[in-house]
Amino acid sequence: MPTIAEIIDNVIEREGPETNDPLDKGGRTAYGISEAANPKAWADGKVTEAEAREIYERKYVKWPGFDKIAHPRLREHLIDYGVNSGTQLAIMKLQKILGVEVDGKIGPETLAALEAADPVRINNLLALVRMRMFGKIVKKDLRQGKYLDGWLARAEEFFII
């Protein structure tokens, strides 16, 4: 079972180096920490790896409650989904799959539904939902198509066979 530190290592590896692509709605990004989503981290003009790791643990693991997810691969998937698309959206997509109230919060109802469900099935459905979402993003703005292969590969990485 990967530790939170190992999951963060994997996210940083997936996110890649610092970028500043004008088509990226996140703006400048380092270690996956975008200026748009984390303006305070960018206040001094840069983000260090140590800052990125602290942000990931606080904002993308503990705050949304992903550390409470028992199944290790689903936990890592939700953390990655949250980094890629926002934690609330990742939770809402999970809740819709589980058939519970969609409130964007990991609470007792969501955790109980997860406990009763097949985590592999839920994980794979989440990957499919994620892939469909990428298609909708590109359909809405064709310029985003340049990211599609990477986004799909990222979601595909989480399928459990």
Image (cartoon, rainbow, N blue to C red):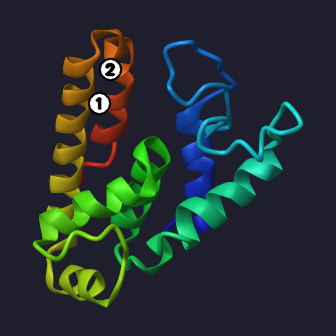
Looking at the image, residue 52 lies above or below residue 101: above
> Does dot 2 land on a helix, a strand or a loop?
helix
Cβ–Cβ under 8 Å for marks 1 and 2: yes
Q: Residue at x 36, y 62 (%)?
A: 73
Indicate left or right for 86 with 148 as reference.
Answer: right
Q: Residue at x 83, y 33 (%)?
A: 46
Residue density around tag 1, few if under 14, some if 14–19, many if 20 or more, within 10 Å: some
Disc 1: which residue: 152
Task: Residue 7: tell me if it is visible.
Answer: yes
Task: Residue 5: tell me if it is visible.
Answer: no
Structural distance between the alpha carbons of marks 1 and 2: 5 Å
The foreground one among 134 and 69 is: 134
Indicate left or right for 148 with 17 as reference.
Answer: left
Q: Residue at x 15, y 54 (%)?
A: 125
The foreground one among 104 and 65 is: 104
Residue density around tag 2, few if under 14, some if 14–19, many if 20 or more, within 10 Å: few
The disc placed on residue 54 is none
Residue 29, image quadrant: top right
Residue 54, image quadrant: bottom right
Q: Residue furthest right?
A: 44
Disc 2: which residue: 149
Q: Residue furthest left?
A: 99
Mark 2 residue type: Asp
